[in-house]
Image (cartoon, rainbow, N blue to C red):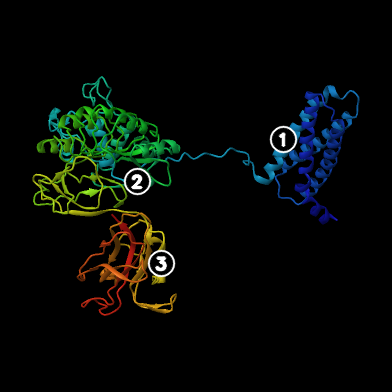
């Protein structure tokens, strides 16, 4: 019998929740009845009766459970008598509710019962979960700061502090007390008063001890009235000295003590907060204003922008301000940006990377650049020594690019000694006997119907671009490019870059074609290989690149033609219905060569008039074989019509049936690749 009672006791945790929930719910009903004057007498009485019955059962099962032992006697007794008291109070409430005068003391007495129930539950939880089960958790203050797993305390902490607070009075141009603090040698040599740095002894080191003197003391550094070091900066210098004052050692930040971690967290800037997404309309507006917009990362909403034009106006800068919370990288190089226009840049609060190469910016314009910029490109500008020095004294810039500015060679070393920022002045005389880079044509399209605007992007160094449109090689007297220009007929554009002191660039040559419409009715008489079959691409006005796998090419090779049931000669044969009223004078065929991929240009192209049902040869073009060293290249081959009012033509593009002598696969079938057939004016 005793074992049965102990077994029944195990149901105590199951049953006890029934009266608890019922009693809390009934108390809520009683409150609603009191304050909202509703009549809930019946559900209240049912709730009290239900909770009373199961409270008594729970007390009995609880007693049976205690027979198993294993509970603290003092806590068990308190819990047991509190539980019995709660059940008794529950019974009194049930009795009182049946009386006609219950309303006066019912709610207060019910409140006492609820408090008693809660205390009972607390001691029950203490027995099952331990005394501290309701103790608030200790929150661990994890320090998260924006640095690497390991740092060089001197170069990444101590040196920047000294640069900002000390170097302006202790540099090669101005060395108070004969002390230089702009580099390692200066710190180790000390000044007229002797050494200022003693490894492992910060108290003996004036580098630290002078920092903590009262500000009124004449030895206190920096002198009163100057920008003072913050407490965490002083503590970091002390730690560096006491840990050996090592200029080269890297310390692991994860192994740093709590005090050091706190100071490092204060010193290093916090990680950039995630920016809200920019609006679609603002981005669309920037693109309409000739900005190229890119997302900085898929993990954030930051934006990178580059102005593709040359004439930047107030409307462009105002449009950038619409995304000032997201814009992190900006390129305004090769524009008419000046000191007046750049003033709006200061409002771009999140900007970290700024490129203003080849602009009219002077020292005055630097004032408008945020001090929080991390990377600044000032190549080929009017920046001088004084302007850059003033800017760097109060900025957080880490990298500055200064090729071809007004800073003299002897001033470059002075700036490098004064500041920890990485100052890149470029390589001296690197242009000697070096060719310029080729001009870059930004207009990718080469087919047009009425006209086409051609635009160059100037290479580094802002050279002159000379060009021709008659197919002749350009020289220093050819047309000078100054702004985009239009072409209105088929031509070959050739261009070179020139600059005094440099070798001219390699020439660039691009063919542009004025088209006379698209062919819509045609019939391929030989099907392409299944691997490279894209017949709909032959007339889509898109020229294929040298990547024959991109989907814009049709490949032909000598094999059995499954579709037509006859051997495929490896040639392309197509019949085309000419558009009515067309002014087409020639047919263009865009083909590919890539010797290493077994692809060669056609051997011969033939054009026939088949309007009358007979093949009448109009023209043909024989194509010389390429050498084995030919690089992959696509080319437009043109065959003239030599006749007007033609209704239907046949085009035969004949392939080289075998690869040339000397090829690793000499004698095997060669591929013929064609991406476009188009009518030309």
Q: Which of marks 2 and 1 is in front?
A: 2
Evaluate if marks 2 and 1 touch, with contact meaning CB atoms under 8 Å apart. no
State the CA–CA distance, disc 3 to disc 2: 65 Å
Residue beneath the point at 40% across and 34% down: 325
Under circle 1, the secondary element is helix
Q: Position of residue 79 (x, y in %)?
A: 74, 40
- Which residue carries the number 2 mark? 148
Q: Dot 1: within a 10 Å radius of its alpha carbon, few (fewer than 14), some, or many (20 or more) residues?
A: some
Under circle 3, the secondary element is strand
Q: Position of residue 393 (x, y in %)?
A: 23, 30
Q: Nearer the viewer, residue 10 or 548?
A: 548
Is 74 positioned to the left or the right of 463 in the image?
right
- Which residue carries the number 1 mark? 119
Which numbered circle lies on residue 523?
Answer: 3
Q: Which of marks 3 and 2 is nearer the N terminus?
A: 2
State the CA–CA distance, disc 3 to disc 1: 92 Å
Q: Which of 225 and 581 is in front in this view?
A: 581
Residue beneath the point at 35% across and 47% down: 149
């Amino acid at each position: 019998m005793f074992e049965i009672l102990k077994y029944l006791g195990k149901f105590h945790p199951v049953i006890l929740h029934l009266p608890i929930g019922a009693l809390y719910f009934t108390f809520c009903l009683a409150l609603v009845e009191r304050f909202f004057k509703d009549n809930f007498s019946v559900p209240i009485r049912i709730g009290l009766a239900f909770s009373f019955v199961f409270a008594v059962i729970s007390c009995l099962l609880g007693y049976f459970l205690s027979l198993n032992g294993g509970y603290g006697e003092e806590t068990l007794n308190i819990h047991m008598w509190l539980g019995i008291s709660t059940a008794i109070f529950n019974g009194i409430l049930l009795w009182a509710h049946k009386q006609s005068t219950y309303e006066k003391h019912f709610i207060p007495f019910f409140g006492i019962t609820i408090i008693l129930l809660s205390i009972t539950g607390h001691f029950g939880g203490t027995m099952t979960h331990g005394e501290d089960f309701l103790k608030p958790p200790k929150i661990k203050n994890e320090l998260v700061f924006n640095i690497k797993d390991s740092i060089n305390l001197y170069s990444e902490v101590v040196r920047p502090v000294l640069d900002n607070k000390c170097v302006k009075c202790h540099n090669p141009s101005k060395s108070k007390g004969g002390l230089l603090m702009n580099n390692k040698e200066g710190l180790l040599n000390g000044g007229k008063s002797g050494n200022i740095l003693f490894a492992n002894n910060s108290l003996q080191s004036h580098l630290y001890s002078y920092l903590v003197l009262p500000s009124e003391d004449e030895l206190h550094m920096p002198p009163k009235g100057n920008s003072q070091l913050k407490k965490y900066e002083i503590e970091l210098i002390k730690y560096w000295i006491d840990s050996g004052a090592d200029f080269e050692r890297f310390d692991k930040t994860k192994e740093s003590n709590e005090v050091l971690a706190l100071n490092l967290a204060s010193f290093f800037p916090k990680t950039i907060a995630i920016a809200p997404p920019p609006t679609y309309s603002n981005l669309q507006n920037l693109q309409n204003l000739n900005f190229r917009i890119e997302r900085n990362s898929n993990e954030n909403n930051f934006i990178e922008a580059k102005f593709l034009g040359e004439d930047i106006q107030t409307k462009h800068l105002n449009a950038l301000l619409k995304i000032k919370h997201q814009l992190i990288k900006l390129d305004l190089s090769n524009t008419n940006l000046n000191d007046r226009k750049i003033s709006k840049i200061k409002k771009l609060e999140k900007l970290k990377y700024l490129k203003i190469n080849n602009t009219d910016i002077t020292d005055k314009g630097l004032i408008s650049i945020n001090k929080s910029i991390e990377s600044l490109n000032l190549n080929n500008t009017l920046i001088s020594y004084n302007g850059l020095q003033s800017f760097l004294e109060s900025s957080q810039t880490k990298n500055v690019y200064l090729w071809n500015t007004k800073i003299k060679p002897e001033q470059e070393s002075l700036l490098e000694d004064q500041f920890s920022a990485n100052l890149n002045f470029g390589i001296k005389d690197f242009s000697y006997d070096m060719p310029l880079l080729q001009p870059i044509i930004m207009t990718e399209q080469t087919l047009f119907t009425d006209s086409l605007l051609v635009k160059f992007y100037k290479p580094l160094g802002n050279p002159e671009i000379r060009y021709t449109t008659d197919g002749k090689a350009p020289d220093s007297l050819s047309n000078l490019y100054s702004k985009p220009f239009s072409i209105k007929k088929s031509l070959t554009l050739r261009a070179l870059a020139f600059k005094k002191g440099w070798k001219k660039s390699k020439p660039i040559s691009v063919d542009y074609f004025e088209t006379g419409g698209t062919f819509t009715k045609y019939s391929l008489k030989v099907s392409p290989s299944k691997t490279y079959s894209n017949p709909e691409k032959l007339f889509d006005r898109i020229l294929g690149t040298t990547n024959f796998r991109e989907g814009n090419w049709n490949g032909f090779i000598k094999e059995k033609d499954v579709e037509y049931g006859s051997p495929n000669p490896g040639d392309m044969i197509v019949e085309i219905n000419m558009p009515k009223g067309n002014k087409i004078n020639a047919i263009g065929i865009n083909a590919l060569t890539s010797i290493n991929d077994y692809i060669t240009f056609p051997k011969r192209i033939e054009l026939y008039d088949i309007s009358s049902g007979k093949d009448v040869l109009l023209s043909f073009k024989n194509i010389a074989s390429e050498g084995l060293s030919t690089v992959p290249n696509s080319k437009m081959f043109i065959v003239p019509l030599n006749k007007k009012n033609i209704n239907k033509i046949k085009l035969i593009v004949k392939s080289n049936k075998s690869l040339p002598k000397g090829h690793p696969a000499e004698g095997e079938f060669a591929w013929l690749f064609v991406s476009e057939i188009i009518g030309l004016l």
